[in-house]
Image (cartoon, rainbow, N blue to C red):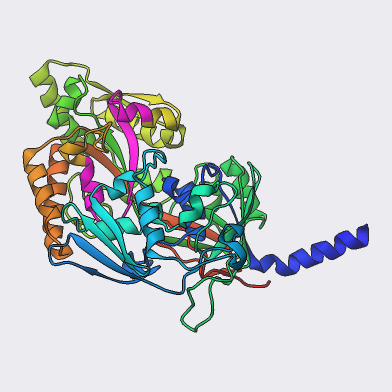
């Protein structure tokens, strides 16, 4: 028995460099790309599926299953030419051949499925500009839009738009997710482990002509506690750690955002701008004289030091959000400065508010979840110094999302992560037609001037022409202070030293097809 166990452990150790291990503390709810709404589901789906197009690490659109495409002069018709060497993962549903080539009919099925009421996909909005999808032949797909929408290609890069076989109508995604991705499904043990194996039929190759992926397998565990996840990483039992949690941030990093000395030789750290704006949203329809006052909303923006907040509460990870709502790293980001820390100005605006309203004890309530309590408490202390009382209401993330959408929160801590790499995605949060709960305008900001500029931007296919309009809209939002941007986040990744080729990108997509683990 001892000899057998020893041999088995030796064999496993020899193959360890071929298995990439990471933990998903939030668990995974579905492997159906139609439900790839958040990072926990997007990451595994990115290993299993391909879309028509993909983004590189600089967020440029690149061919994927579609090898090329053309856009009509009126920017309403997209014609895609599909590769003829893309095969689905092997499965008995395909009969004796065990697989088959992807066709345009699969793309029609996959995209139309997003708007099927029976599926009820949270990604149905991706297709809201689409008028019709048709297969001209096995390798030609045509998508007609209702109106020009310059960001449409970016939408198609989302995992929602992954291509699956028409046969999936007969299968359960939990047990039989079939895609074309670099890895195929092996097994899923609830709350324990999810395992993918190398797809030997995968069509992509590296620059030297070698078939991807390099790894033999991906193993995902589900430890719910971030501190436990960190301990697993520190012990070398998982290969990758994403983000910076308060439970271990000081153990890993100093206040300058550098690795602590005892980790400098053991792990690698990657940092890059993240298309994520962390902010306080102010619900403008809330029955509150404080939130109805532009002066007081501006006072909130002036009343705390974002630089100090980033240094001491985020260990230097992130950029103070003084330049608008559009995050750093996205075309449309402006170098303009709207709200630097100015307590004297904040105090003056609050005094003006008191005189105008006769409210001698102005108070606002900020709702947050526990993960961001330290940030909100810092803002609370700073605003109280300039004369604004702040109450903090801590609630579970799901409750916070529900009440925010229902318009029951006066002010709320939130973040907006880019769904696709176009600033329109951020600016849509302030378009009047997108009022929550039907849309993402949680602040209920409304401006006829803003709406008109927003509509104009949708008619311009050239990004260079859209950027001045994007910056104009951002300026309107900031001047009227519908939100309080806190910081533009950074993607931060930690890996074991033997991990090579992971890379980093502004949407924090986990792409494992070019990853290698070197033998120690």
> Residue 144: percent from the left, percent from the top?
22, 57
Residue under the point 39% across and 39% down: 120
Magenta span includes 220: no
Determine which quarter of the picture holds residue 215. Answer: bottom right
Q: Is residue 340 visible?
A: no
> Residue 163: percent from the left, percent from the top?
42, 58
Residue under the point 30% across and 40% down: 279
Magenta span includes 403: yes
Q: Is residue 312 visible?
A: yes
- 185 above or below 441? below
> Residue 506: percent from the left, percent from the top?
36, 59
Determine which quarter of the picture holds residue 7. Answer: bottom right
Q: Please identify the quadrant where the N terminus is shown.
A: bottom right
For the magenta stretch, what is the residue range?
402-429
Residue under the point 36% across and 45% down: 123
Q: Name the one closer to the observer, 424 or 201.
A: 201
Q: How many marks?
A: 0
- 443 above or below 38? above
- 237 above or below 229? below
> Residue 419: percent from the left, percent from the top?
33, 51
Q: Name the one closer to the observer, 44 or 250.
A: 44
Q: Please identify the quadrant where the C terminus is shown.
A: bottom right
Q: Name the one closer to the observer, 400 or 379.
A: 400
276 relative to 178 in the view: left or right: left
């Amino acid at each position: 028995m001892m000899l057998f166990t020893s041999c088995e452990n030796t064999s496993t150790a020899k193959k360890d460099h071929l298995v990439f291990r990471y933990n998903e503390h939030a668990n995974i709810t579905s492997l159906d790309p139609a439900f790839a709404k958040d990072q926990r589901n997007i990451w595994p789906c990115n290993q299993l599926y391909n879309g028509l197009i993909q983004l590189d690490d600089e967020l440029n659109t690149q061919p994927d299953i579609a090898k090329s495409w053309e856009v009509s002069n009126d920017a309403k018709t997209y014609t895609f030419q599909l590769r003829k060497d893309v095969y689905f993962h092997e499965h008995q549903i395909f009969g004796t051949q065990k697989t088959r080539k992807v066709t345009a009919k699969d793309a029609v099925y996959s995209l139309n499925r997003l708007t099927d009421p029976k599926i009820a996909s949270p990604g149905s909005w991706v297709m809201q500009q689409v008028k019709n999808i048709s297969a001209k032949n096995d390798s030609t797909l045509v998508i007609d839009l209702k109106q020009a929408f310059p960001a449409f290609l970016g939408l198609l890069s989302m995992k929602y738009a992954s291509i699956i076989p028409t046969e999936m109508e007969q299968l359960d995604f939990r047990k039989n997710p079939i895609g074309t991705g670099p890895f195929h499904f092996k097994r899923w043990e609830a709350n324990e482990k999810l395992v993918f194996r190398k797809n030997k039929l995968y069509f992509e190759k590296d620059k030297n002509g070698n078939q991807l992926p390099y790894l033999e397998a991906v193993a995902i565990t589900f430890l719910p506690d971030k501190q436990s996840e960190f301990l697993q990483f520190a012990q070398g039992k998982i290969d990758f750690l994403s983000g910076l949690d308060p439970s271990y941030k000081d153990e890993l990093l100093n206040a300058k955002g550098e690795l602590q000395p005892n980790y400098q030789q053991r792990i690698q750290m990657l940092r890059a701008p993240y298309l994520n704006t962390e902010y306080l949203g102010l619900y403008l329809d809330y029955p509150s004289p404080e939130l109805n006052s532009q002066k007081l909303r501006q006072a909130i923006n002036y009343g705390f030091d974002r630089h100090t907040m980033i240094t001491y509460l985020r260990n230097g990870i992130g950029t103070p959000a003084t330049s608008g709502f559009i995050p750093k790293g996205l075309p449309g980001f402006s170098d303009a400065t709207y709200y630097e820390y100015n307590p004297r100005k904040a105090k003056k605006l609050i005094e003006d508010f008191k005189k105008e309203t006769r409210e001698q004890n102005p108070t606002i309530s900020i709702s947050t979840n526990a993960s961001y309590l330290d940030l909100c408490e810092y803002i609370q202390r700073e605003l109280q110094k300039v004369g604004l009382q702040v109450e903090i209401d801590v609630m579970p993330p799901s409750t916070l999302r529900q009440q925010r959408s229902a318009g029951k929160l006066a002010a709320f801590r939130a973040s907006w992560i880019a769904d696709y790499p176009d600033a329109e995605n951020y600016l849509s949060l302030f378009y009047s037609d997108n009022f929550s709960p039907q849309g993402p305008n949680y602040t209920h900001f409304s401006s006829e001037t803003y709406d008109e500029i927003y509509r104009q931007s949708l008619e311009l296919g050239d990004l260079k022409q859209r950027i001045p309009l994007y910056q104009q809209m951002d300026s309107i939002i900031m001047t009227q202070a519908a939100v309080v941007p806190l910081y533009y986040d950074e993607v931060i990744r930690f890996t074991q030293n033997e991990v090579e080729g992971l890379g980093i990108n502004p949407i924090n997509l986990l792409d494992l097809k070019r990853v290698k683990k070197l033998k120690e």
